[in-house]
């Protein structure tokens, strides 16, 4: 059996998700009640078996090291596998990666022993996937690269790599974040987008990077995959389409997508994402026990929501909302379709809809609607769903 290793890209600044990323790497932003965004990728690695997992950190890398050491290393060690955090070799401060492909090449290019297949993953996506299915597909076609693929809406195409694909999965052309779909995807047809999940034949990837002109092959989407597609050695593996029955995947890019993915958890996607116990994983970051479909005591009413063990609702109405650790909603308040991050508080008689409260935010009611006593509040509107307007009061 040929060997498999994992490489998780978790070093970006996350500038589009600011201000949540002002003091945290984007993969460590809280998602759901008890977890972080990166937990989904790491759980997938554990559940899929294989070899060691290398997490490439850069921005605030020490926070990533601390979190993985306490939350995830014991689970990998229980399977006889290593979980290692790596920073840029040429910059102790963590500013030396010039792109996704450069990050991987800097880290593994000089290794004496490489796995036969390298699974490269993003640390800021929410989904459940057994990578063995994709690895088996890669072994069978014998190419250099396999790209995880999902159908997306046409308005989303500018955010992703878009592929022209033959019936057997062979990628004819790869376009990184095209400005227009003209000549790429026929009208009324959904584009096939890259998930940022790849399986590479390690030797082929390293040879391509070593022989590339200096500074020309820094990024997988812009450089490596278009070249492999042009050589006829890249294939797409379809993960999901669009619709209620499709497997769930979300790229947490900016505040609207963070809010929308949080709402998806409460609209049925959560059932597809929950973690099951694994050896060495003492705490499940996302589990069924935090769902409240219809409950409440002492005058409180909680419907279709996710509540942390330490969240509190007192005589208030909370509907389709995620409440993080230590968050509170006081008597007479109404909170709908919102995310309350850790330590945030909605005071008496305040009304909140379609919002994200940053950690530690305190919201009070005033004659004109809402007042923020501390912290910040966001009313994101998902660009593909204009009818869901953000509102306060």
Image (cartoon, rainbow, N blue to C red):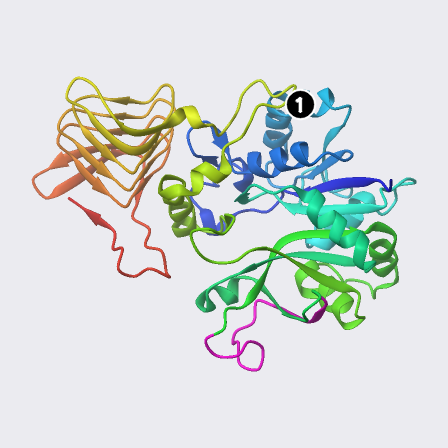
Quarter of the image where one finds residue 342: top left
Establish if 18 lies above or below 308: below
What secondary structure is found at the residue carrying circle 1? helix
Q: Residue furthest left?
A: 367
Quadrant where the N terminus is found in the figure: top right
Please give left or right for residue 261 compared with residue 109 in the image.
left
Quadrant where the C terminus is found in the figure: top left
Establish if 332 lies above or below 165: above
Quarter of the image where one finds residue 303: top left
Please give left or right for residue 377 compared with residue 58 in the image.
left
| Stretch in magenta | 170-188
Q: Residue at x 55, y 39 (%)?
A: 27
| Nearer to the camera, 264 or 27 | 264
Q: Main secondary structure of the magenta part?
A: loop
Q: Residue at x 52, y 58 (%)?
A: 241
Establish if 72 lies above or below 205: above
- Residue 74 % position (x, y): 67, 20
Task: Report how many numbered discs are placed on residues in the image.
Answer: 1
- Residue 291 % position (x, y): 37, 29
- Residue 179 % position (x, y): 52, 73
| Nearer to the camera, 116 or 393 | 116
Please give left or right for residue 91 compared with residue 253 in the image.
right
Instruction: Rate crowding at label 1 as few (under 14), some (14 to 19) or many (20 or more) other CA atoms within 10 Å.
Output: many
182 inside magenta stretch: yes
Q: Residue at x 47, y 69 (%)?
A: 154
Q: Residue furthest right?
A: 112
Q: Which residue is identified by label 1?
A: 75
- Residue 135 % position (x, y): 74, 48
376 inside magenta stretch: no
């Amino acid at each position: 059996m040929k060997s498999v290793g994992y490489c998780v890209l978790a070093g970006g600044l996350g500038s589009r998700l600011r201000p949540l990323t002002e003091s945290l790497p984007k993969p460590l932003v809280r998602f759901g009640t008890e977890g972080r965004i990166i937990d989904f990728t790491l759980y997938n690695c554990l559940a899929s078996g294989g070899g060691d997992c290398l997490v490439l950190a850069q921005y605030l890398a020490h926070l990533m090291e601390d979190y993985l050491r306490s939350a995830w290393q014991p689970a990998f060690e229980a399977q006889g596998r290593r979980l290692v955090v790596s920073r840029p070799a040429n910059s102790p401060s963590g500013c030396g990666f010039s792109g996704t492909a450069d990050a991987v090449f800097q880290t593994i290019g000089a290794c004496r022993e490489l796995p036969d297949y390298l699974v490269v993953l993003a640390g800021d996506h929410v989904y459940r996937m057994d990578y063995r299915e994709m690895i088996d597909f890669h072994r069978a076609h014998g190419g250099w690269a396999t790209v995880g693929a999902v159908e997306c809406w046409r308005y989303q195409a500018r955010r992703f790599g878009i592929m022209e694909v033959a019936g057997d999965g062979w990628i004819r052309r790869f376009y990184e974040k095209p400005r227009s779909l003209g000549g790429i995807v026929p009208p009324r047809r959904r584009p096939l987008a890259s998930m940022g999940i790849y399986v590479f034949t390690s030797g082929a990837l390293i040879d391509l990077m070593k022989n590339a002109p200096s500074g020309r092959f820094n990024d997988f989407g812009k450089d490596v995959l278009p070249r492999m597609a042009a050589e006829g050695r890249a294939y797409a593996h379809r993960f999901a389409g669009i619709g209620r029955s499709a497997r769930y995947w979300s790229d947490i890019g900016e505040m609207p997508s963070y809010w929308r993915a949080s709402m998806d958890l409460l609209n049925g996607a959560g059932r597809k994402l929950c973690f099951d116990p694994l050896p060495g994983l003492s705490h499940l970051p996302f589990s069924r026990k935090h769902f409240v479909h219809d409950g409440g005591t002492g005058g409180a009413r909680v419907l279709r929501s996710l509540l942390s063990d330490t969240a509190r609702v007192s005589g208030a109405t909370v509907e389709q909302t995620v409440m993080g650790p230590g968050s509170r909603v006081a008597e007479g308040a109404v909170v709908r379709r919102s995310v309350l991050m850790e330590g945030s508080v909605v005071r008496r008689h305040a009304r909140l809809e379609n919002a994200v409260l940053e950690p530690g935010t305190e919201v009070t009611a005033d004659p004109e609607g809402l007042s923020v006593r501390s912290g910040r509040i966001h009313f994101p509107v998902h660009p593909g769903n204009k009818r869901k307007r953000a509102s306060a009061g």
